[in-house]
Image: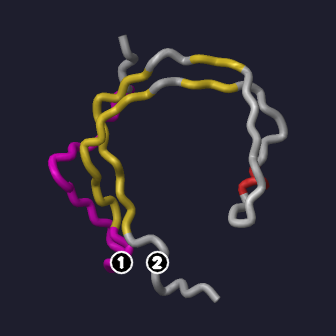
Amino acid sequence: MNDHSKPLLHQLVQTVSSGTKFGELWRGTGELELHPSIFEEHTALAPKEILGAYIIPVGFRIEGTRLLHDYVKDGVPVVEEQGDAQPPRSTAPQMAD
């Protein structure tokens, strides 16, 4: 029986990043092979059809983390800054030159 009086998740944190840049998008054919495992059930997620494959290089700097919610406390959302991390910008990332 599952005990729901204690949270399975203690904290919800957000990674704060900056300097996001994207490289050139490449498209090609794709294939995926999921090997069976006695420990995992991932083969149930196998796709029925592969329509294509894409790769795009992405680079960014991790500035720190921000605590969004502490589930161990009384359930009231808590927002605390850790380190010098700044809130993420709401503007779209700029493409690389």
**Is 83 situated above or below 87?**
below
Count of numbered circles in the view: 2
Report the front residue among 10 and 38: 38
Residue 87 included in the magenta stretch of the image: yes
Q: State the extent of the magenta-drawn residues as a range.
A: 70-92
> Label 2 sits on what residue type?
Pro
Give the residue displayed 73% in from the left and 27% down from the top.
30
Residue 6 falls left or right of residue 11: right
Q: Are marks 1 and 2 in contact (CB under 8 Å)?
A: yes
Residue annotated with mark 1: 72
The quadrant of the picture occupied by the N terminus is: bottom right
Pick the quarter of the image with the C terminus. top left
The secondary element bearing badge 1 is classed as loop
Residue beneath disc 2: 7
- Please state which amino acid type lies under the numbered disc 1: Val
As helix, strand or loop, the secondary structure at mark 2 comes to: loop
Residue 87 drawn at (x, y percent): 26, 43
52 over 35 or under it: above or below? above
Q: Name, please, the residue furthest toward the left.
A: 84
> With respect to residue 27, does 30 lie above or below?
below
In percent of width and height, residue 62 lies at: 30, 41
What's the CA distance linking mark 1 and mark 2?
7 Å
